[in-house]
Amino acid sequence: MKLLAIDGNSILNRAFYGVGRPLANAAGMQTQAVYGFITIMRRHMKGNSSYKAAVAFDLKAPTFRHAMYDGYKAARKGMPDELAVQLPYIKRVLTAMGIPRFEVKGFEADDILGALAEQAAANGAECEILTGDRDSLQLIGGGVTIRLVKGKGDSVLYDTAAFQAEYGFAPERLIDLKALMGDSSDSIPGVKGIGEKTALELIRTYGSLDGVYDGLNSIKGPVRAKLEADRDMAYLSYNLAKIDRNAPVDWSDATADITPDNDELYRLFSELEFKSLIKSYGLQPPEGEEPPIAISEPADDIARYLLDPIDKRPIDKTTAEQQLRERGMWKLYTDIELPLAPVLREMERIGFCVDKDALAAYGEVLEEELERIARECFQIAGQEFNLNSTKQFSTLLFGRFGVTPPRFAKKLQNGAYSTDAKTLEQLQDAHPIVPRVLEYRKAAKIKSTYVDGLLHLIDKSGRIHTTFNQTLTATGRLSSSEPNLQNIPVRGEFGAEIRKFFIAEPGSKLIDADYSQIELRVLANISGDQAMIQAFRDGEDIHSAVAAQVFGVTPGEVTKEQRGRAKAVNFGILYGMGDFTLANDIGVSRAEAKAYIEAYLEKFSGVKDYLERSIEDAKERGYAVTVYGRRRPLPELKSSKYQVRQFGERVARNMPIQGAAADIIKIAMLKIAERFKQELPEARLISQVHDELIAEAPDRFAEQVKTIMTEECAGVGNFEVPLIAETKIADNWHECK
C-alpha cells in the first residue's frame, strides 16, 4: 500500500498562484484554486490503484511554535480573500470524494504529514508527500519520499539519493541548515549574517548544528563571531524548523478505500461550473434532477479570454468561433494569440540562466547591509525596535519624534498611522530616520523576494523557468509568475544588481530588443497628432520636444528639470493622471501641474481630441478597442459611483494604447521566432518583460540575431510613426540597459 499525503494549504496556494488565469463561476466567485488543487491531485493519483490519500490543513489557531517564539510567521500575510473563499469548497470536495482530512489545533500541516508518514513507515507502507514546501524534505527516508510541486503543477520526486545529490548531506540535516540560515517566509531568525551559501558549507563541513558549535574554534573570522553571538537563536531556530512527527493523528483513518459521493460531487462541480471535471469523473445528475449546466466541450482559453478578458466563464467552441468572427477578432485569435502559445511554451521550457553562486553571495551582502542600516536606525532612535512593525515605527515616528502624518495617511485598526511606502516617501525630509527605514525595507524586499525567492526556483541546470500568463491581463499584456520577471526592478542600485545575475550560459550571449517609447509612438499614431508625429519622424527626443512646446522654448534651451516634467506629463496624460497626482509626482503646486496639462493639451490638440473621442466611443460601444481588434469591456462607465466611472474613463483612454503595444510585441515575438526557426535554429527567445524581448544565442551568431530582432521589431505594422527597438548584445541582463 502507498499513502499519498497531501499538504493542503501548500497545494491550494500553488494552484491559486500557479494557474495562468483566474477562473470564476457565474456568481463571480474565483474558483481556480479549487480546480487547480483537484487537477494536481488527480495527476499524481492517476493510474495508481494502490494509492490511498489524505490531506492535511493548517488551522488559524496559534501552534506550539508561536508559544516558543512570538515572532514566528509574523511577517506572513494572511490568505487573500479570493483564496480564502475557496478553502471551504476544497474541503467539501475532498469529503465528497471520500478523501480524509486532518486538522489538529496547535499543530501545522507539516507536523500532521510528518506523523502520518512516520506511522505509515512503521506499518510497512510507503508514503509519498505531495507539497510545494521544501521544509518537508527533512522527512525523506525510511519509505518516505517527497514530491515537490512547482509552478504549473509539475513536480520533482525527492528520495534520499536525490536530496543528497542536491544538498550534499542527509535529509534530516535540512533542519540544521534552517537553524543557521533561517527562513524569511516563516520568520525563523537563524544566525544573523549567515546566508544559504555559508550555511550549506558549514553543514557539509561539520555535519550538523552541534558539529558546527563543537568545531567553533576552527572557524575563523566574522562567521565565527556571528555564530557565537547567535548561538541561542540558532538552537531556537532549529526547534522552530523541526517537524514534530508526534502530532495526535491516526494514519489508519487514511487507509479506507476512496469512495466518491456522486450526487454531492456533481452538485459541487455544477455550482463551481467545472464541466470538464464532471465529464472526467463520469458523474451523473442526482436522480430526479436536471443538469444545471450544459456538459459540452469548453472553448480554449489562450478564445474565451479574447471575448471577455474580465468575465472569464467558459463558453463552448462553436459559440466562441461565431462570436470572434462577428466581433472582428478572428484574425487576432488565429494570427496572434493561437500561434503565440507554442512560442511561450518553448520559452518556459528553455528558461533563463541565473548565476546561483553570485546571487547567493549577494544575499549575504544584503544581510550585512540590513544589519548596518538597522544599527543606524537604532542609533538615531536611541533604542532598538522592529523595523518591520508598523505599530512600533508609527509610535516612534508620530509619537516620540512628533512628526505630523500627511493628510492621506491611513489609520490602522490598532490605532497607529500607516507607515507604508507612500506615507514615508512624503516624509523623507521630516526626520533622518525615515530615509533609513525606507532603505531597510527596500533591501529586505529585494533579499526576500528576489534573492531568496529566485534561489528556490533555480533548477539543476542553473536556469529558472517562469510561467508566461497569456490570458490574464485585461489589456493583452503578457505577465509572468514564479518568478514574476515583470516585477524585477529596472532602476536603482538593488534592482541593477539583481539583473546582473540573469546571464547567458557559457559560450553564449543575450540579445535584448527594447522598444523605444512604444506607447507614446502608438499614441502619436492613433491620435494623428501632427506635432508629435513630426517630432518622432525627425528623431527628436520626445520628452524634450514636448518640453519645448509646453514651456515655449527651443529644444536646445530645454533644461533637465523641464524635460523631467514634460516626461511626467507625457506619461501622466497616457495614464489619465490628474493635476493633483502630477503635482505630487513632480513636486510643484496643483495650479502649476494643471497649467502644464492644459499647455500640453493646447499644443498637442490631436492628443486632446483622441482622449475625448476615446471616452465617448467607449460609452457608445460599451468597450475600448485596439487597432488590432482587441476589446476590453467597460461596464465601469455606467456605474453610479463617480470613482468607478473615473476609472472606466482612464481605461477607455489607455487601453487602446496599451493593448496595441501588447499586440505589437506579440507580433514581433512571432516574427522573430519564425526567423530563428528558418534561419538560425541555434538562437532562441527566452523572455519577454514589459517592452523587452530577450534572446540567447552562441557568441558567433549574436550579431546575426541582433539584426533579425532589430528588423522584425521595426517591421511590425504600417504606422506613420516608425517603431524602433534598441537592440544590445550582452553577457547579462543588466548590461542590456
Image: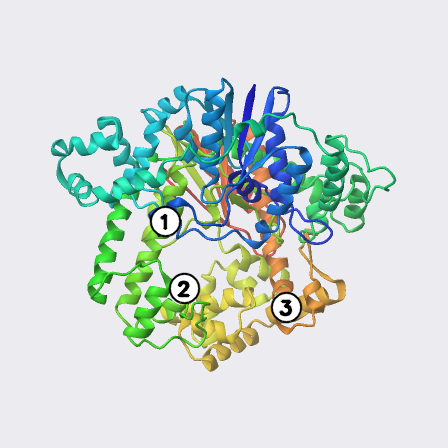
Graded by Cα atoms within 10 Å as few (under 14), some (14 to 19) or many (20 or more), the crowding at tag 2 reads few
Circle 3: residue type? Val
Residue at 49% from the left image edge and 69% from the top image edge: 569
Graded by Cα atoms within 10 Å as few (under 14), some (14 to 19) or many (20 or more), the crowding at tag 3 reads some
Residue 378: image x %, image y %? 22, 62
Q: Nearer the viewer, mark 1 or mark 2?
A: 1
Residue at 26% from the left image edge and 29% from the top image edge: 208
User: In which image quadrant can residue 441 be found?
Assistant: bottom left
Q: Secondary structure at mark 1?
A: helix
Earlier in the chain: of badge 1 and badge 2, it is 1
Mark-to-mark CA distance, 1 and 3: 45 Å
Circle 2: residue type? Asp
Residue at 45% from the left image edge and 44% from the top image edge: 106
Residue 552: image x %, image y %? 46, 77
Disc 1 designates what residue?
67
- Quadrant including the N terminus: top right
Disc 3 designates what residue?
644
Disc 2 designates what residue?
420
Mark-to-mark CA distance, 1 and 2: 29 Å
Circle 1: residue type? Ala
- The answer to which of 655 and 385 lies nearer the viewer is 385
